[in-house]
Image: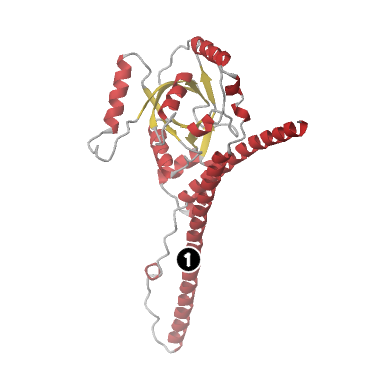
Amino acid sequence: MASRKETGSSSNAGMSSTGGTLDSPVKQIQIEGLIIKHYQEEGQGSEVVQGVLLGLVVDDRLEITNCFPFPQHTEDDADFDEVQYQMEMMRSLRHVNIDHLHVGWYQSTYYGSFVSRALLDSQFSYQHAIEESVVLIYDPIKTAQGSLSLKAYRLTPKLMEICKEKDFTPEGLKKANIGFEHMFEEVPIVIKNSHLISVMMWELEDKSTVSDKHELLNLSSSNHLEKSLQLLMDRVDDMSQEIVKYNTYSRNLSKQQQQKHQYLQRRQQENAQRQSRGEPPLPEEDITKMFKPPQPPPRMDTLLIAGQINNYCQNVKEFTSQNLGKLFMAEALQGHN
């Protein structure tokens, strides 16, 4: 990809952290502040919005400088071609001298519910075609609570190999030694603003009223916590169903192995009796056709559910720690009064 000369100054509004050294060609993501404003405007409704990320790669840093959403079309728009729409949009941006290189996609989420098979398949397609591709996840509900929720993810090299081979059986995942914690890697984000945007933000902060600044002390966040716990319980139920499916498969496989062993023993005993009587042994039979192994359930869905459960737990942990601090502070204030 092409590179460019950087202009303007950077104002780091936040950076997400990773658990270790990244194995991807992208070590950091730089995003324009105006793109976050676009996410916020697009994600105000109840529908999940998606779009294309445009930018370029400078060394090991991915710079996201522009984006555009996928149009919201219904089932009646059967003739709509999303690929043609994307090509026309990027061609139009190129004509006005705006970065038009495809570097990933974005998606809004609610209460952190984004770990799904659809996201996995989409990111695999992007990352397989464009190595530096990322997916940006924006949570408008969590952002409305007072903290920007914007994270960038990529598929790990292990998961990319499994998706290429399409081997999602228990043996395949066990051989690859992959768990839900090794599926996605988070890439740090740096938000860059120009001088003019930084000045505007300082002016808005000075003009903000006292009541707006005290909104973070509001104790009424139980609705968000209640919804997160409800979603967590739903996914735990899904995990229980997946465990039941796997236990059923294990019992059927063990039962079939016993039947196969008993059959071979009976056949061996009968051949021994026939040999003692001077008769020829029984003809050879294809055991694999007689005892077809049961089909193992795909384990990728289980990994995705486990990853989503872990995500919900992190959200609940974060909100409970914040609420406990507020409650202790409120209790101290009431005791002082």
Say what amino acid the circle numbered 1 marks.
Answer: Leu
Report which quarter residue 53 is drawn in. Answer: top left
Is 179 placed above or below 27 here? below
Query: What residue would you read off at disc 1?
Result: 253
Residue 2 at x, y percent in the picture:
40, 18
Which of 178 and 262 lies nearest the eye of the viewer?
178
Residue furthest bottom in the image = 277
Mark 1 element type: helix
Residue at 60 percent of width and 37 percent of height: 319
Residue 182 at x, y percent in the picture:
54, 41
Residue 320 in view (yes/no): yes
Residue at 42 percent of width and 63 percent of height: 294
Residue at 38 percent of width and 74 percent of height: 284
Which of 234 and 167 lies nearest the eye of the viewer?
234
Q: Residues within 10 Å of mark 1 (few under 14, many from 20)?
A: some
Residue 276 at x, y percent in the picture:
46, 88
